[in-house]
């Protein structure tokens, strides 16, 4: 049976919407994800039979599918920046079409079976590379679809989110085979039994293994006492125009009743100190003195807090450098650990928000500096840290993860390999108002807890500050648009998971397989044209 173009267009709409509503907090109907990619596979395989105009039809249908998916899952960026949502949705949708063009080429040269394998490994390679290149935006990786169901993703401690992507793709491929055989090839339902068996096993094994890990996992009791403040200061205007004294006073007034001699750390949100601090004279800065005055009153408790900091240079240090009189300076989004017993520890945010804190390829195209927009962070280019830094206070090693960095699984695992026993996340999620954005951002901390088997303390300017255990379950949390404080004892851990030891093996294997299949397809194509390859 030949499927007509109008039918392919309808499949595109159905598939794109289905994938969008399967994503956490834009529907959270995650089981739909196991069939929502199937229409895209069917569309691309059927288009291989088309002749003239096939390229543009493929582009149009794929782009429409991903435009629907990205719009449904990312529309909330609008509240931070109208320009930002257009950039995120339009550009990311375009990038997501690329694996299918390479997949179509490989399918035509090597056949449908290898073509389906190629699409899987190409998509996984795309997601893997999306963590590392200049246009990085891995928010919508398919493995995140399980993000609000921690019971079902316990095996991420071995595979990371790329394993979840593989699972979703694999089941969709089996579903595609059934639909193709029944609808296109007109086969009987009975002879599809082996494929149904593979689908059943493909669902039962990961689910049952995850539930087994979840219910048998036991945290070693090794408590760390932490107080988390959520000041709930409006993000767009109040956060950056209210005097720092007022903001710090509010945070410490919230925290003060909970701080006792047993508390190991007070955690405050990203950019809680909203004025630039000179990094060469931190101890002389008034906000730091204010923090120290609080510590003098409260048992000398260490404070991990977000701040804007600045460094000055004799010459341009990086694309983020700006001229100032006879000097150059850089702004940083910084985490500071202020401990009365030792020098201030600092870490600069390294995974920056695309568009607002960094621009792609600005080193090659410096004029792009003038086009940074406000996407959910600081407006203007920021300097970055060289590598993850681990803080130590009260005999505990903390990972000072800042905001968007919590999206990056392998990056957070570097902290753990460097000795982090607790993950702290400081963030400012008020940019997106009460939308799926801050909820999705919170779920990344749950995924990181599972991958690293580290408890997480999360302090947000507003929604959601929380504590998360090593199974990814929320222990306690503060709601959006609520000022308050949390106080919990969470367990530290020193053991390394498979993912921490070896990283994203699924992603790397997929990348090598994709390269191998593409080379094989190129050689096959050249031979078909009578060109010798040896």
Image (tube, rainbow, N blue to C red):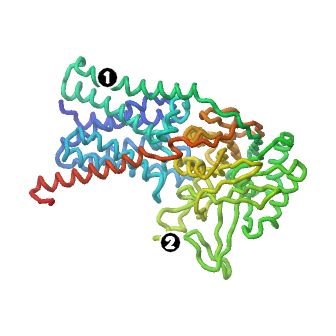
In the rendered view, tell whether residue 508 sits above or below residue 363.
above
Find residue 36 and name its label. Answer: none
How many discs mark residues in the rendered view?
2
Q: Is residue 37 left or right of residue 474?
A: left
> What residue is shown at x 23% (from left), y 44% (from top)?
107
- Name above or below for residue 366 compared with residue 420: below
Comparing 398 with 283, the one in front is: 398
Q: Rounded to the nearest whole Å, what is the CA distance between mark 2 and mark 1?
A: 55 Å
| Residue 435 visible at all | no
Residue marked by disc 2? 366
Tell me where residue 302 appears, x and y as whole percent.
Answer: 79, 51
What residue is rendered at 51% in x and 50% in y?
85
How many neighbours does mark 1 have within 10 angstroms: few (below 14), some (14-19), or many (20 or more)? Answer: some
**SS class of the residue under badge 1?**
helix
Tell me where residue 30 appears, x and y as whole percent: 47, 30
- Quarter holding the C terminus? bottom left
Earlier-in-chain disc, 2 versus 1 = 1
Give the residue displayed 65% in from the left and 72% down from the top.
329
Q: Quadrant of the N terminus?
A: top left
Q: Residue furthest bottom?
A: 326
> Is 176 on the left or on the right of 126, as rendered?
left
Image coordinates for residue 416, horizontal then vertical, percent: 60, 48
Residue 196 numbered mark, or none: 1
In this view, the residue in front, 51 or 302, is 302
**Which residue occupies the extreme top position in the image?**
190
Residue 259 position (above or below residue 340):
above
């Amino acid at each position: 049976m030949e499927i007509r173009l109008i039918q392919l267009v309808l499949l595109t709409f159905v598939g794109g919407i289905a994938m969008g509503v399967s994503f956490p907090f834009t529907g959270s109907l995650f089981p739909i994800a196991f069939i929502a990619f199937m229409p895209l596979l069917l569309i691309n395989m059927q288009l291989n039979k088309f002749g003239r105009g096939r390229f543009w039809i493929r582009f149009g249908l794929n782009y429409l599918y991903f435009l629907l998916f990205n719009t449904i899952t990312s529309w909330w960026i609008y509240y931070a920046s109208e320009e930002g949502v257009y950039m995120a949705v339009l550009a990311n949708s375009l990038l997501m079409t690329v694996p299918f063009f390479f997949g179509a080429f490989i399918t035509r040269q090597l056949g449908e079976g290898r073509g389906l394998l190629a699409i899987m490994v190409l998509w996984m390679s795309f997601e893997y590379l999306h963590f590392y290149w200049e246009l990085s935006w891995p928010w919508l990786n398919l493995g995140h679809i399980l993000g609000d169901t921690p019971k079902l993703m316990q095996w991420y401690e071995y595979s990371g989110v790329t394993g979840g992507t593989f699972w979703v793709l694999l089941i969709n491929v089996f579903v595609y085979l059934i639909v193709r055989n029944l609808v296109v090839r007109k086969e009987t339902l009975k002879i599809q039994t082996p494929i149904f068996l593979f689908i059943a096993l493909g669902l039962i094994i990961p689910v049952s293994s995850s539930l087994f890990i979840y219910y048998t996992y036991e945290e070693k009791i090794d408590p760390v006492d932490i107080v988390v403040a959520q000041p709930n200061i409006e993000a767009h205007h109040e956060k950056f125009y209210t005097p720092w004294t007022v903001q710090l006073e509010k945070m410490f007034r919230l925290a003060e009743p909970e701080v006792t001699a047993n508390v190991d750390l007070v955690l405050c949100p990203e950019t809680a100190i909203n004025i630039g601090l000179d990094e060469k004279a931190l101890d002389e800065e008034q906000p730091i003195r204010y923090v120290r005055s609080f510590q003098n009153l409260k048992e000398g408790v260490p404070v991990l807090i977000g701040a804007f900091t600045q460094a000055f240079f004799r010459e341009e240090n990086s694309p983020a450098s700006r001229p100032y009189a006879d000097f150059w300076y850089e702004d940083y989004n910084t985490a500071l650990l202020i401990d009365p017993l030792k020098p201030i520890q600092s870490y600069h945010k390294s995974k920056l928000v695309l568009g607002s804190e960094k621009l792609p390829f600005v080193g090659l195209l410096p004029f792009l500096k003038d086009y940074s927009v406000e996407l959910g962070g600081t407006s203007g280019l920021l300097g970055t840290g060289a590598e993850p830094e681990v803080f130590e206070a009260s005999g505990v090693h903390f990972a000072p993860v800042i905001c968007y960095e919590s999206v990056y699984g392998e990056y957070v695992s570097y902290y753990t390999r460097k000795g982090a026993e607790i993950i702290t996340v400081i963030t400012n999620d008020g940019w997106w108002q009460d939308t799926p954005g801050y909820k999705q951002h919170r779920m990344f901390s749950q995924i990181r807890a599972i991958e690293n088997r580290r408890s997480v303390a999360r302090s947000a300017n507003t929604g959601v500050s929380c504590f998360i255990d090593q199974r990814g379950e929320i222990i306690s949390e503060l709601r959006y648009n609520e000022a308050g404080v949390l106080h919990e004892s969470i367990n530290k851990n020193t053991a390394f998971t498979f993912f921490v030891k070896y990283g994203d093996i699924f992603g790397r294997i997929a990348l090598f397989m994709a390269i191998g299949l593409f080379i094989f397809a190129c050689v096959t194509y050249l031979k078909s044209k009578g060109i010798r390859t040896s």
